[in-house]
Image (cartoon, rainbow, N blue to C red):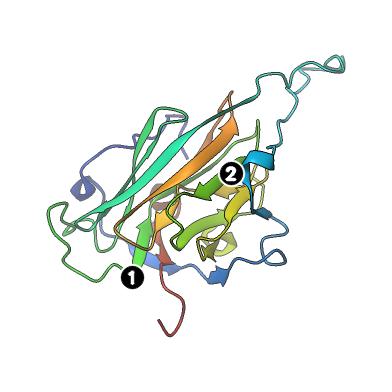
Amino acid sequence: MTDTAPVYIFEASEKPSLDLHDVPLIVATEQSVGEYGCLVDDPEKFDIEIVRWPAQGWRQVDEGTGNEGGFVEGIFHAEWKGDILYGSNEAVNGNYVLGWSTDPQSASAEQSTVPRDKVLLWHMNYHPDGGQLFYPLDNQPFVVPVALPGDDLTPDKVVAFWCDGSKGLYIHPNIWHEGIFPVQDKQRFLDRQGRVHARVSCDIGQEFGVYLSVPLKRQGE
């Protein structure tokens, strides 16, 4: 564990070769995503949850305060370049290496060297200040890895939702997640999240000595 904020833009070869932990892929339905959030038909009619600022001691935060920051929104771009999956989030001015499709020691940003049937994920995070909505603008399938709240995250607690692209995915505050994984070469998503943008991170590779192998295709595809 580390108190240092993760560096999100780097050369894949800076990361070591590690064993893989297979993440189960679940088709997103109202029932399957219920503990984590919900599916969203119309983002214009959907409000995200904003969590009140926590009290520092026995004196409580005044009613009607501590949750007035509202939300921000923008376009989240997810794009494959060779074997590397990159993300950029206009809502919070973030740029990320989300993962890679093969061993990072041999992954190429110039060309695909293996089929893009999985993402090897090195990092996850959660937002204690608010929920987050990912709504597909290109109506293509996408995958989102998630885990239920709690700082004792372990690889076996992570699942991935396969979404068909007809609806958005909303996750509650404190749900572990990573950026959206496009099944195609690139995709755009409406991203809406708390303006405070508090983030708690876990470097999976560093803490557990594995990468999470997140499938992009359902069994049989």
Inter-mark Cα distance, 1 to 2 = 25 Å
Binning the other alpha carbons within 10 Å of mark 1 as few (below 14), some (14 to 19) or many (20 upward) gives some
Tell me: residue 57, above or below residue 90: above
> SS class of the residue under badge 1?
loop
Tell me: residue 131, above or below residue 121: above
- Occupied quadrant, residue 96: top left
Q: Which of the two labelled residues, at mark 1 and mark 2, occupies the earlier sequence position?
A: 1
**Residue flagged by tag 2: what amino acid is it?**
Leu
Q: Nearer the viewer, residue 193 or 160?
A: 193
Along the horizontal axis of the image, is 71 left or right of 96? right
What is the x, y in percent for residue 181?
41, 56
Quarter of the figure that contains the C terminus:
bottom left
Determine which residue is flagged by label 2.
133
Q: Who's the residue at 21% across and 70% down the image?
A: 114
Tell me: residue 3, above or below residue 110: above
Q: What residue occupies the far left of the structure in this picture?
A: 110
Q: Nearer the viewer, residue 2 or 106?
A: 106
Tell me: residue 7, above or below residue 172: above
What is the x, y in percent for residue 73?
52, 31
Binning the other alpha carbons within 10 Å of mark 2 as few (below 14), some (14 to 19) or many (20 upward) gives many
What is the x, y in percent for residue 219?
46, 81
Q: Who's the residue at 25% across and 71% down the image?
A: 115
Q: Nearer the viewer, residue 40 or 94?
A: 40
**Residue flagged by tag 1: what amino acid is it?**
Asp
Q: Who's the residue at 45% across and 63% down the image?
A: 141
Q: Nearer the viewer, mark 1 or mark 2?
A: 2
Q: Who's the residue at 51% across and 66% down the image?
A: 164
- Occupied quadrant, residue 142: bottom left
Along the horizontal axis of the image, is 102 left or right of 206? left
